[in-house]
């Protein structure tokens, strides 16, 4: 009998501890003499929690890949009134988060969708769970346009293929569950090729118009499979369960992946190789109803759930365990405060000043990645100040704010202070006085913007070169509570959100190049008093008014969702990068000052050994 070494060219090592793993160990087998186990680094499939959708719900349509997906239509039952339970909400997935997209003109759920994120097509649907539809639309990556209607109305219709070569079939009509199918070319519909099974309501499907597959479904619940060769449907190997009665599907005809939604919910998934179905890793969250999905057997995304559910999961197949991005509780501040100045990094952060109820504090604390330690105090206690947030812990800058306990306005200041890692000292005064302002940059290249200089919402901007403040280009309009500012210097700044007169929150994003403020991609929702971290082309915005928990990521063009804070708060301090940030302190309703620190960490991957067993 041949040995393992003779077959694979590698020996089975005997080790007393597992080695430090990396990709070079893939396929290697070793025996751990301490635990008495045979181990190897082999590929495996697993799901992990990812970034939530902006608008939740089920009975969604989707088209695209694991890195670029368009999701369209929602059924929000049992949330809103029956007369408005379905919507045409649409969102784009970029492989990391969900961003806003143009709303579909049809406020329908169950829009059978296929194609790509930049060339998708929808077919049929249902309005408010009652009225079946025959309409069709097309998406070009920017806007939706009408397409000729199908010859039939249908709910839980099904469609696979491309925008210019698709197959739509099955579903439910007022008179039953027909076997009818239609071929779409992006300009209209022709009859056929019809199914061999007339019970394809909410079936899973994937593939092309010449090599497609349909599996599972309702009316009644079934496990049957049909495959299309472009002309004829033939029976395929049945699924191992009838539980997938409203699945979603990704992949191809010979490499399909059946995912939840199911009525009632399930976590089970199955892979198909063209001949055999095999159970695969379960999703973390039980799901029901048709959901948004895209990808392949080795990389895919799944999103949505009833009751406005926004949960998203991603699937990977490889040697690594992926831990999804998340906020986690860090060390608490020694002195709670909101409206503070924050700067530094996740492992070397700084928090200075702020409001403690009506009082202002001079406390300055340093963070080492685990806990906060009291440092040298500011020369003057003040709150509602700003910081050059990208400054390192050892060379920071704070400015503006108010020194008055109550009311705040008499103490509004233009003072600035510099920190050298040991002590604070007074710097030159700003070119204007302001509280509830925003700041960005570093100690030698900082920007202040907006704020409140009663009774005015200020549009004023200041620039600091390490010695003096000078006037910069004014904002397009006055803002206060615009703490959502970040950037590495005066020429690469970002401002997200803020409150403009008459007290209205904004979705506006402004980018600063040292000369002009220009509009960037809008936030998906209005916000002020939010924290920010990162740089102009890779930033985070988090928290804000109304105890918001939402976190958004910016890529220099558009915002998309990220995992939410555990605790929503306004006037929260933000620092760090878009992959390793801190949310510090803040204020929760109805006026509770926080000591809480939350740490944001992006996706991490760790090579993971598997124990080999016999069966």
Image (cartoon, rainbow, N blue to C red):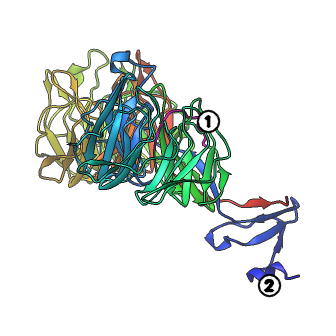
Q: Which mark is residue 266?
A: 1
Q: Nearer the viewer, residue 94 or 361?
A: 94
Magenta segment:
283-292
Percent of width and height locating residue 529 = 31, 30
Instruction: Inspect this view and state whether residue 29 appears.
Output: yes
Considering the image in quadrants, where does the C terminus appear? Answer: bottom right
Considering the image in quadrants, where does the N terminus appear? Answer: bottom right
Of mark 1 and mark 2, the one earlier in the sequence is 2
Task: State the SS at label 1.
Answer: loop
Is residue 290 found inside the magenta-colored segment of the image?
Answer: yes
Residue at horizontal 15 percent and vertical 35 percent from the top: 432
Residue at horizontal 67 percent and vertical 42 percent from the top: 241
Is residue 359 found inside the magenta-colored segment of the image?
Answer: no
Task: State the SS at label 2.
Answer: helix
Q: Residue 176 vs residue 100: left or right? A: right
Residue at horizontal 15 percent and vertical 47 percent from the top: 518
Q: Main secondary structure of the magenta part?
A: loop
Instruction: Inspect this view and state whether residue 379 appears.
Output: no
Q: Is residue 6 above or below residue 84?
A: below
Q: Which mark is residue 6?
A: 2
Percent of width and height locating residue 195 = 47, 46
Percent of width and height locating residue 376 = 44, 39
Q: Nearer the viewer, residue 141 or 9?
A: 141
Q: Residue 328 vs residue 13: left or right? A: left
Question: In front: mark 1 or mark 2?
Answer: 1
């Amino acid at each position: 009998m041949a040995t393992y070494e003779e077959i694979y060219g590698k020996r089975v090592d005997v080790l007393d501890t597992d080695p430090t793993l990396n990709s070079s160990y893939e396929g290697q087998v070793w025996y751990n003499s301490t635990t008495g186990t045979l181990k190897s680094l082999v590929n495996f499939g697993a799901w992990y929690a990812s970034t939530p959708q902006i608008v939740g719900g089920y009975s969604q349509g989707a088209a695209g890949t694991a890195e670029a997906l368009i999701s369209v239509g929602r059924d929000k039952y049992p949330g809103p009134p029956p007369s408005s339970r379905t919507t045409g909400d649409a969102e784009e997935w970029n492989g990391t988060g969900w961003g806003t997209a143009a709303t579909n003109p049809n406020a329908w759920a169950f829009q059978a969708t296929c194609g790509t994120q930049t060339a998708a097509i929808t077919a049929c649907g249902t309005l408010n769970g009652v009225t079946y539809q025959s309409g069709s639309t097309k998406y070009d990556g920017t806007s939706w346009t009408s397409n000729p209607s199908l010859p039939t109305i249908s709910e839980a219709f099904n469609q696979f293929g491309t925008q210019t070569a698709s197959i739509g079939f099955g579903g439910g009509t007022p008179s039953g569950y027909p076997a009818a199918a239609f071929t779409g070319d992006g300009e209209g519909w022709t009859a056929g090729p019809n199914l061999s099974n007339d019970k394809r309501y909410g079936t899973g499907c994937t593939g092309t118009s010449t090599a497609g597959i349909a599996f599972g479904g309702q009316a009644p619940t079934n496990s049957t499979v049909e495959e299309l060769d472009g002309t004829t449907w033939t029976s395929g190997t049945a699924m191992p369960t009838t539980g997938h009665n409203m699945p979603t599907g990704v992949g191809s005809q010979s490499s399909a992946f059946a995912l939840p939604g199911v009525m009632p919910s399930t976590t089970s998934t199955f892979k198909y190789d063209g001949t055999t179905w095999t159970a695969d890793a379960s999703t973390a969250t039980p799901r029901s109803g048709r959901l948004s999905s895209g990808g392949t057997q080795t990389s895919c995304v799944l999103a949505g759930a009833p009751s406005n559910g926004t949960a998203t999961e991603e699937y990977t197949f490889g040697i690594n365990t992926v831990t999804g991005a998340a906020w986690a509780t860090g060390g608490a501040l020694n002195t709670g405060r909101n409206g503070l100045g924050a700067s530094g990094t996740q492992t070397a952060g700084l928090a200075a000043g702020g409001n403690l109820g009506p009082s202002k504090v001079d406390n300055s604390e340093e963070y080492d990645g685990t806990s906060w330690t009291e440092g040298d105090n500011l020369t003057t206690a003040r709150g509602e100040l700003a910081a050059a947030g990208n400054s390192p812990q050892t060379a920071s800058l704070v400015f503006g704010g108010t020194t008055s306990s109550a009311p705040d306005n008499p103490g509004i200041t233009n003072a600035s202070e510099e920190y050298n890692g040991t002590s604070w000292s007074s710097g030159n005064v700003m070119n204007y006085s302001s509280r509830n302002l925003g700041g960005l940059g570093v100690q030698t290249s900082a920007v202040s913007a907006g704020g409140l200089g009663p009774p005015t919402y200020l549009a004023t901007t200041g620039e600091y070169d390490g010695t003096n403040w000078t006037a910069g280009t004014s904002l397009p309009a006055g803002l206060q509570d615009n703490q959502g500012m970040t950037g590495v210097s005066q020429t690469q700044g970002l401002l997200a959100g803020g409150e403009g007169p008459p007290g209205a929150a904004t979705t506006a994003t402004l980018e600063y190049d040292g000369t002009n403020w220009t509009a960037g991609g809008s936030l998906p929702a209005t916000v002020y008093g939010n924290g920010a971290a990162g740089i102009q082309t890779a930033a985070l915005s988090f928290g804000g008014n109304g105890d918001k928990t939402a976190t958004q990521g910016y890529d220099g063009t558009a915002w998309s969702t990220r995992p939410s804070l555990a605790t929503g708060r306004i006037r929260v301090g933000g620092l760090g990068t878009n992959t390793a940030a801190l949310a510090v302190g803040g204020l929760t309703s109805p006026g509770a000052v926080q000591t809480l620190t939350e740490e944001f960490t992006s996706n991490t991957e760790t090579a993971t050994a598997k124990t080999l067993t016999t069966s």
